[in-house]
Amino acid sequence: MKKLFFFLFVFCLAVGSHAQDTKEEIQKRQQELQKELDDLNSSLIQIRKNKKQSIGQLALVQKKIKLREALVNNISRDLKRLDNDIEAATTEITQLQGQLDTLKQNYAKSLVFAYKNRSNYDYLNFLFSASSFNDAVKRVAYLRSYRQNREIQANNIVKTEELMGQKINSLTSTKTDKGKVLGEQSKQLITLEDDKKQKDIAVEQLKNQEQEIAAQIKTNEKNRLKLKTALQQVIRRAAEEARRKEEQRLQEEAKRKTTANQQAIADNKNNAPKEQPKTDRKNDEAVAGVSTGTKGDRTYSPFESTPEGLTQSLNFETNHGNLPWPVNSGIVTIHFGPYQIPGTGLRGVSDGIYIALPVGATVKAVADGEVSSIFDLGGQSAVVIRHGKYFTTYNNLSTVNVNKGDEVKAGKAVGAAAADDTGEGQLLFMVSNEKGSPLDPEKWLKHR
């Protein structure tokens, strides 16, 4: 019986611990989702100061719907956990009730037996009727054991009743929690329906502004081509500068080798007839390898001809999918590649991601690098930073905090976000390779 209670106690602890861990995980996720929703609502309030509907407003509402749906799903997970806890507790109470009934029946039988044999005469008669002294000793031990067993039975009944009481209280508490969670789920479902109505209204308003949006997309396309041309020129100039520095380094290295060899030959002539010194063939081959198109296991790039450039490239690649975002808060309104405006037939192409954020928000470098260029585009500034053979572009800045040639670290403020044509804060963030080909920034940045 003691073993039974021990295993039951351990089982209860294990189940309770697992449920607690799951509960904490679910509650933590719920807090995270609620915080994101609060931030979005704050951003939406700021953006809605602009009376006109915009793509940014629609993107915020769509993001709210996704987060709200995730929150509802998380609440459903919590309800499932509570249902499992209620089912497990109900099963345990039923089992404990069965054990309690059995214990009480056995204890009642022992009491009846004790009552029938309660006289001292019967006790003495039981002892003196023993066939031998050893038999009498065994009978005394039996009576003592029988008395102890009744005490154990009574204690087991008390412990089982206490444990069952705890389980009943826990079950009542869990049912109360379930009622609260059901109320929260109902509240979130109602809010979700309101969010969907807001989305429908936003889409309808965008339909009414189709001509204005079409003109905006046309302007964006012109700026995209201008930025693409300017970026390619920046990368080409940077590549030419990197090659020039590399050629200069190789020439200086060759000059040093020639001088060293000439000096060695002169020293040999002055001292004694010895073998001519051998050139550093291994080093020559390494230099030749750099100049002919290979560098270790990597395809040669002039941007990686220096240790700093190679390190920056490798660090950038190592952090693929884990680079910090260029802004503390904001939402992607237009994703990389072809896109369509919801509710309309309007389409466009983006070489980066458009992020809606408060006007004047700080824009930061996503990795260590060097500022390659700063130029004006459509009345706003763009900053290009080189990270080895990769480039990041931060467009639509009202102010710039860096200069061309500056070495910057990840997290360094490069400027402040400016307003777009609708008066809302916006940043165009791009990632490009050494050929100027655009890459999807969201595949390089941390998931959030």
Image (cartoon, rainbow, N blue to C red):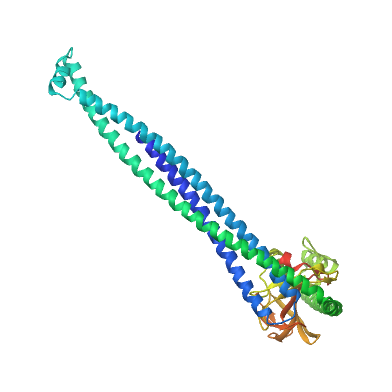
Drawn side of residue 281 relative to residue 408, left or right: right
Q: Position of residue 139 (x, y in %)?
A: 20, 20
Foreground pick, 78 / 435 = 78
Drawn side of residue 227 relative to residue 407, left or right: right
Drawn side of residue 169 relative to residue 82, left or right: left
**Can you see residue 445?**
no
Quarter of the figure that contains the C terminus: bottom right
- Which corner quadrant of the image does residue 240 belong to? bottom right
Q: Which residue is rendered at x = 37% and y = 43% of the image?
A: 163
* Residue 22 vertical position relative to residue 419 in the rendered view, above or below: above
Drawn side of residue 148 relative to residue 336, left or right: left
Quarter of the figure that contains the N terminus: top left
- Which corner quadrant of the image does residue 158 belong to? top left
| Number of marks in the rendered image | 0
Q: Position of residue 44 (x, y in %)?
A: 66, 75
Foreground pick, 283 / 93 = 93
Q: Position of residue 28 (x, y in %)?
A: 54, 61
- Which corner quadrant of the image does residue 128 belong to? top left
Q: Position of residue 301 (x, y in %)?
A: 81, 69
Foreground pick, 249 / 203 = 203
* Residue 14 vertical position relative to residue 182 in the rendered view, above or below: above
Q: Which residue is rendered at x = 69% and y = 65% of the image?
A: 196
